[in-house]
Amino acid sequence: MATVTDQPTPARPGRRRSQESRLAILTAAIELAGEVGYAGLTIEGIAARSGAGKQTIYRWWPSKADVLLDALATKADLHVPIPDEGSYAADLRAFLAATFRLGRDRRVVDALRALMAHAQLDEEFQQRFRSAFLQRRRDALGIILDRARTRGDLPPIPSPGTAADLVFGVIWYRMLATSQPVDENLIDELVFTLAEPR
Amino acid sequence: MATVTDQPTPARPGRRRSQESRLAILTAAIELAGEVGYAGLTIEGIAARSGAGKQTIYRWWPSKADVLLDALATKADLHVPIPDEGSYAADLRAFLAATFRLGRDRRVVDALRALMAHAQLDEEFQQRFRSAFLQRRRDALGIILDRARTRGDLPPIPSPGTAADLVFGVIWYRMLATSQPVDENLIDELVFTLAEPR
Amino acid sequence: MATVTDQPTPARPGRRRSQESRLAILTAAIELAGEVGYAGLTIEGIAARSGAGKQTIYRWWPSKADVLLDALATKADLHVPIPDEGSYAADLRAFLAATFRLGRDRRVVDALRALMAHAQLDEEFQQRFRSAFLQRRRDALGIILDRARTRGDLPPIPSPGTAADLVFGVIWYRMLATSQPVDENLIDELVFTLAEPR
Amino acid sequence: MATVTDQPTPARPGRRRSQESRLAILTAAIELAGEVGYAGLTIEGIAARSGAGKQTIYRWWPSKADVLLDALATKADLHVPIPDEGSYAADLRAFLAATFRLGRDRRVVDALRALMAHAQLDEEFQQRFRSAFLQRRRDALGIILDRARTRGDLPPIPSPGTAADLVFGVIWYRMLATSQPVDENLIDELVFTLAEPR
DNA sequence: GAGTAAACGAGACGGTACGTCAAGTCTTGGC
DNA sequence: GCCAAGACTTGACGTACCGTCTCGTTTACTC
C-alpha cells in the first residue's frame, strides 16, 4: 500500500544518482584525509582519487567538510549505544567508555578535530555539524540524564545541561587543546564528580 | 654594560624594524578579522589595508594566525589577574568572572575561536598557540589550585589537572560548539561542583 | 509512386521525429543567438529555451553551428532570385541589390559572420557550410556569369572565377573586417569595374 | 638628455616584467597553434608549455587571440615593404607578390584565419585586431594608392576605398572560404582590373 | 492488443578549461 | 638591511558546458 511517506521513489525522470560514485568519493575523502591531513585535503584531490568529476561532488556536498562528515557517518560507526546499566554512575561510565573506545582511532579523532575547526570558519557548516553530529551526541547523553532524573539518581547540581557541557567540554578540550585523549582515569574522576551523591 | 636582555639594540647593520609597520599590520589584521571574518582574512588583505608590503609580513610572522595572535596579545587585554580572595571558591569565582567579562567582546571571542580552529589545521601553529595562550591561562588557574591545596581547600577529586580540563573544557565547548558563552549561572554551578567540600 | 527521395516514410518502427521539437530548437537557437550572441550560444541554452533534451539536439545536429545554419535556412529567406535582366551589368546589379537587402537584417548578418568564424575553427563544419551556403551563392552568381558569356557580354578579364571571388570577397570583407555593409555606392563601383567593356 | 618621451623607465617600484616569460609564452602559443590548431589552443596549454603561470598570461593579454596576435607580430615578419616601383600597376603587383609570399606559410595563414574568426566572436578583440593588423595593411595599400593618385596613375573608378576592399576582399575570401591562396594568376587579373587605364 | 523499437524530457555522469584568488617567493629602487 | 611595490610560479577554487549515459514515458509499427 502506497502512503505519503513513499517518497524514496517518486518516479522522477532523469538518470539516478550513482551510488558507485558516492561511495568512491566518501572512501577517497577518508583515505586522503588520513594521508595528507585535512588541510591538504582538496575537492580536486577527492575527485581525482575517486575518479569522479568535480561537479559531481559539488552537486551533492557544499564543501569538503561536508564530504568528510558524510564519509564519517557512512563509514565509521559513530553510534553510541546507551543500554540501561541500572544507575546514573554506571550509565555515565558506559557512555564515556564508548567514547573512549572511539577516541582510540587516530583517523576518526583527527577528522573530528578538523570538522570542529571547519565549523568555526564556516557559519553554515557549523549548523550542519551541530545538528548532524554534536546534537545527536548530546541527545544520547540527554537520555541517560533523563533516566537518572526519573530514577531520582541525579544530583541537583550541576543541572543536566551543564553536566552535558562538562562532559563534552573535557572530551573536546582534550582533543583540541592538549592532545590528551579520554582515558580510564578521567572516566573515574568524571563519574565521581558528576554522579556521586553529596 | 650590555646584558643578555639587551636585545632591542644588538648593533646590527641595516635599517631597524619599523614599529609603524608592525602596528599598522596588527591593527589591520584585527579590523579585517572583524569585517570579513577569519576565513576571509588574507595576508594580501592585511598588506593592502596596512600599507605594508607582503614581504614585511612574511618576514616577521609565519602565518595569518600568528599575526592575529600577536595582534590580540598586543591590542586586547587578555591578562587575567588572580588576586587572593581568601578561598578556593572565591578565587575560582573571580577567575571565571574575569573570563566571563572577556567573553562579552564578540571580536575577541571570534578571534579565539578562529585561532583554536587554525591550530587544528596547522601543527606548528598549534605549538605556538598552546604555549603563547592556552598554557598561560592554564598556569593562571594552576596558581589558584596550588594556593587552594596549600590552604587545604582543594577537594581530592577531581585532581588539579582534571579540574583545569573541566573549567577550560566548558568554556571552550560553549564557544566552539554551542555559541553559548559563560554566564553567571554557569559560574555558580562550576564553583559548586568543583569547590564544594563533600 | 515512391521514389528514392521519398525518405520521410521508410516505414521504420519506433517513434517519428518530432517536428515540434525541431522547430522549437531552431527558433530557440535564432532567438538566443540574437540575445546573447553566438559566443554565448550553448547547446544547453538551446535545450533549456526550447524545452528539448540535449540528447535530442545531439541526435540531429553535430554542433551549435549546424543548428544555427539549419535555423537560418529554415526561417530566414536566404534565396537569391536571378531573373534575366537583359545584360550582365543589370543582372549583376540585381544580384548585388538582393544581397544588399539581405545585409540589412542585423541578425542574419551576425549569424553569417559567426558561421563563417565557426567554419575556420571546425574543419568538418567548414565543408558543410561551404556546400550548404557558400557554394550555393557562388552557383547563383555562376548562372549570371554563364548567361553573360553566352550573350558575349562578359569582359575577358577577370575570369568568371575571379569575378566571383571579387564580388563575394568585398561582401564578406566588409562584413567581417570593416562592419561596413554593401551599399548603393559599392554596387555602382562593382558593376562598373566588372561589367564595363573596355 | 632626458625628454618627455623617456617613458620606458619611469622609475616605478616593483619587479620588472620578465622578458623571458613573455617570449616563452609567445613561442609556446605559436608552437601549440601549429600543433593542435587554434580551437585546441588553451591558455592552460600555453602556460604549461611555456612554464609560466596562468596569471602571468592573464595579466598581460586579455585572451588567447591576443597572445597569438602578439606572437605573430613579434615572431613572424608581417611587415609589407612598399618601395616605389614607378607605377601604380608595378606597386600593386609588388604589394600582392609580398602578400603572396606571406600566404605560402601555412602556419601564418592558419593563425590569421583563426584571428579573423575570433574577431567575429569577441567584439573587443575585433577592435584590437583591426587596429593592430587589418588597418595597418590597409594603410600600406593606402600609401600606394595615394602615390598613384599623385602620379595621376589611378583610375577614377573604383575609388581608393573600394579598391582596397576589392584587394583585401579577394585575399581574405580565398583564405576563409575557398582555401585557395593568392597566386600569380590572381595577381595578373587584379592588376589588370584595378590598374589598367580605360 | 501485446510486443518491440525508436525518439522524447530530464538529469546525472566524467571531463576540460575557464577566469579568479591567494599563497609564498623574487626583484626592483629608495630610505 | 628593511621597506613598499609589484611581477613571478603554483595550485586550488567554484563554474560552465561539453558530449555521453541512464531513466521512465510516449508514439509508432509489427506480429
Image (cartoon, coloured by chain):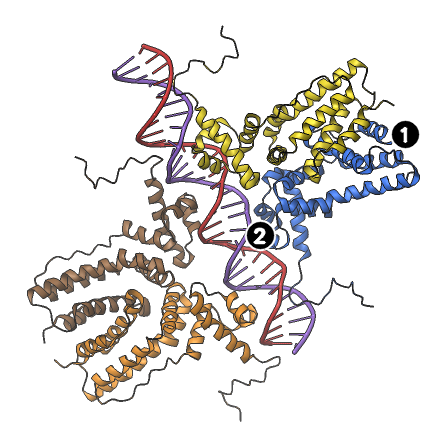
Chain colours: A brown, B orange, C yellow, D blue, E purple, F red
Q: Is residue C83 left or right of residue A146?
A: right
Q: Which residue is mark 2?
A: D54
Q: Provide residue C193's location: percent of width, then percent of height.
A: 81, 28
Label count reads 2
In this rendering, the answer to whether B101 lies above or below C137 is below
Figure quadrant of the C terminus of chain D: top right
Viewer-closest of C67 and C171: C171
Left or right: A171 as drawn, with respect to F14: left
Q: Is residue B142 above or below residue B50?
A: below
For disc 1, the marked residue is D197
Image location of residue A82, percent across then percent down? 15, 57
Q: Amino acid at mark 1?
A: Pro
Marked residue chain, label 1: D
Q: Residue at x 44, y 79 (%)?
A: B74
User: Which numbered disc covers residue A162?
Assistant: none
Residue A111 location, x and y as percent? 33, 58
Q: Amino acid at mark 2?
A: Lys
Residue count near mark 2 (Cα–Cα under 10 Å), binned few <14, some 14–19, many ≥20? some
Quadrant in which residue D147 is drawn: top right
Q: Quadrant of residue B117?
A: bottom left
Residue C163 to residue B183: above or below: above
Image spot of residue D100 (x, y percent): 79, 34
